[in-house]
């Protein structure tokens, strides 16, 4: 474990790294973990001395939990949060203690839970961003270092990489081959290297009140991730942060210019707003205490390019894109950006791949981020209209199912692809996930047994490329042993059968999802996505062609018209 240093150990100290990450939020810390796990020396610079206490993002979807599982922190994240299956309901009510208007079950039955569990080795969890940050800091691996309390003020390309000057009590100069910009929405370093930000028209301003209270008298028996409240005083949402510890977030959008004045331009009694949302006086709400309050503008932003002109700086997470929280894809998208980028940086830094491989990062991730932005914007507009409506309760309950894609999005979480067909979206179905092992898709999860243990297919390509094949594909083991690496990263082969000494497909899920024929193999990338399906006729040539496609798979997409 590598301790987080409060500041550089020497004044004006010089530090060298393969990659410098600017920003120690979830995206930056995840990038450090993924890079260090691939042998890349990584330094993270973070201005804050401690993680923010305000919850901000709260939902970690199943794909991100898979990545945290690869880092070995998923169990701790789950212990620090609330299993989503325990709060897999969305409730609409006049007040928390008032009349329930409607409910939407995300996981409606034990059968639905089993079906969802079949799609991933882990389930989603509610765990606030600040807790995730703290765990990622505590578990930084060897090869990654975090310096807190320093602010990166200059980012300059050099002949061999980048130079970063960080100010603080003990200034530091960092020399690195590449920089990952994870400074968030309000960072300014991107502009100094030509990364120009654009913004869509804001969708509104919101008030967040983070508070402590025992709400169990009104939540017991109808535990929910969200409680949407609609009354004359408050129209907003109570967000579950950690009900066992009595931690909540009340989020209220300003729906009119009058509310803009009420919430942001005059003194506001935040306790009264909480009381109005719950429907009880402060004396009746046990342990009520406000931790923090913030207001912020909801909208989408993006960069014209995610990579600087000279190629040494790449943006990720909120530094590359932001979108409304309606859907919970902000932090998740950022961590998944880092996962996609890390193996490509490792391949290039190790000499196994040309620099052009890094162009595939934006080519693949931008369409996913833009889809998430559009869907989040649509959700936000739909919820705004709902909060402003005066529909009668019966009509409200009858139409609530149309809001499911806002809250039930397994197809969007697991089903996005990096290789959509011409004119096809990166997500075919927001709600329903259909496993497929076609190129561009996340390699489907299936439990396998071997050597006295159970592993997931998602475990087979953690630190390199993996060839997954069936009983007739044993030739791929010899090919992998001879090659040793693919694009400079380790290459292994797994022969999966229904019996015998190798990995066993005991449930048939692998055969169903991968649909392998004869000597065919599926080549899985270190980020868990399928690079190619290889027929096994001329295996060495097929691997060379797959490597060429990985590097030369088309131009970086231009920013979509009308999108931020």
Image (cartoon, helix red, strand yellow):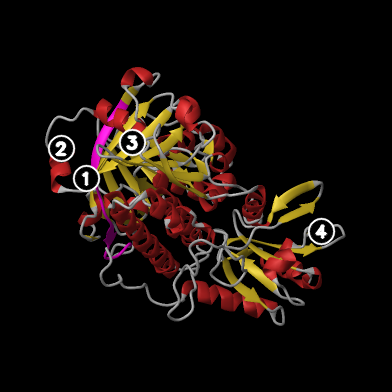
Mark 2 Cα-neighbour bin, 10 Å: few <14, some 14–19, many ≥20: few
Name the side, left or right, on which 525 lies relative to 211: right
On residue 331, which mark appears?
A: none
The residue positioned 61% from the left and 47% from the top of the image is 122
Residue 169 can be seen, yes or no: no
- Report the Cα–Cα distance between label 1 and label 4: 59 Å
Which comes before the other along the chain, label 2 or label 3?
3
Q: Foreground: 390 or 267?
A: 390
Q: Foreground: 498 or 164?
A: 498
Q: State yes or no: discs 1 and 4 in contact (Cβ < 8 Å).
A: no
Q: Position of residue 237 (x, y in %)?
A: 35, 41
Q: Foreground: 408 or 356?
A: 408
Report the quarter where the C terminus lies: bottom left
On residue 262, which mark appears?
A: 2
337 drawn magenta: no
Name the side, left or right, on which 190 lies relative to 121: left
What segment carries the magenta color? 291-306
Depth-wise, is mark 3 or mark 4 nearer the camera? 3
Q: What residue is disc 4 on?
A: 502
The residue positioned 15% from the left and 37% from the top of the image is 262
The residue positioned 70% from the left and 81% from the top of the image is 538
- Res 480 quadrant in image: bottom right
Depth-wise, is mark 4 or mark 2 nearer the camera? 2
């Amino acid at each position: 474990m590598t301790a987080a240093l409060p500041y550089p150990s020497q004044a004006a100290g010089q530090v060298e790294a393969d990659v410098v990450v600017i920003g120690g939020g979830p995206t930056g810390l995840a990038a450090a973990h993924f890079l260090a796990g691939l042998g890349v020396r990584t330094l993270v610079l973070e201005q804050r001395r401690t993680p923010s206490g305000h919850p901000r993002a709260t939902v970690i979807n199943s794909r991100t939990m898979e990545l945290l599982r690869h880092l070995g922190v998923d169990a701790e994240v789950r212990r620090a949060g609330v299993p989503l299956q325990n709060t897999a309901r969305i409730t609409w009510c006049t007040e928390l203690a008032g009349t329930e208007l409607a409910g939407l079950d995300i996981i409606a039955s034990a059968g639905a839970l089993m079906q969802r569990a079949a799609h991933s080795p882990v389930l989603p969890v509610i765990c606030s961003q600040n807790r995730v940050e703290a765990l990622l800091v505590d578990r930084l691996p060897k090869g990654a270092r975090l310096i807190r309390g320093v602010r990166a003020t200059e980012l300059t390309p050099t002949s061999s990489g980048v130079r970063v000057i960080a100010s603080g009590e003990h200034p530091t100069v960092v020399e690195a081959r590449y920089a990952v910009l994870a400074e968030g929405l309000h960072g300014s370093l991107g502009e100094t290297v030509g990364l120009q930000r654009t913004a869509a028209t804001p969708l509104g301003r919101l008030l967040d009140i983070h508070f402590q209270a025992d709400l169990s008298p009104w939540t017991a028996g109808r535990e929910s991730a969200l409680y949407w409240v609609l009354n004359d005083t408050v129209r907003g949402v109570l967000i579950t942060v950690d009900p066992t510890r009595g931690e909540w977030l009340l989020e209220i959008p300003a729906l009119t210019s009058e509310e803009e004045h009420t919430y942001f331009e005059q003194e506001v009694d935040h306790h009264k707003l909480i009381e109005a949302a719950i429907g009880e006086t402060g004396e009746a709400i046990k342990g009520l205490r406000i931790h923090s309050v913030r207001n912020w503008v909801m909208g989408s932003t993006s960069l014209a390019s995610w990579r600087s002109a000279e190629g040494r700086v790449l943006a990720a997470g909120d530094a590359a894109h932001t979108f409304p929280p309606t859907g919970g894809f902000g932090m998740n998208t950022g961590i998944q950006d880092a996962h996609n980028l890390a193996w490509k940086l490792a391949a290039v830094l190790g000499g196994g791949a040309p620099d052009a491989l890094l162009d595939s990062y934006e080519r693949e991730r931008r369409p996913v981020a833009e889809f998430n932005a559009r869907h989040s914007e649509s959700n936000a507009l739909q919820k705004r209209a709902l909060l402003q409506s005066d529909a009668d309760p019966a009509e409200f309950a009858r139409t609530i199912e149309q809001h499911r894609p806002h809250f039930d999005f397994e197809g969007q979480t697991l089903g996005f692809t990096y290789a959509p067909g011409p004119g096809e979206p990166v997500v075919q179905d927001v709600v329903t996930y259909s496993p497929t092992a076609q190129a561009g898709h996340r390699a489907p999860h299936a439990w396998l047994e071997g050597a006295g243990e159970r592993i997931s297919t998602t475990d087979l390509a953690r630190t390199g490329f993996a060839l997954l094949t069936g009983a007739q594909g044993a030739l791929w083991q010899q090919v992998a042993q001879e090659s040793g690496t693919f694009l400079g990263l380790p290459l292994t082969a797994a022969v999966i059968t229904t019996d015998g000494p190798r990995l066993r497909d005991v449930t048939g899920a692998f055969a169903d999802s991968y649909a392998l024929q004869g000597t065919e193999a599926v080549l899985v990338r270190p980020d868990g996505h399928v690079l190619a399906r290889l027929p096994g006729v001329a295996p060495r040539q097929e691997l060379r062609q797959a490597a060429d496609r990985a590097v030369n798979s088309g131009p970086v997409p231009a920013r979509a018209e009308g999108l931020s």
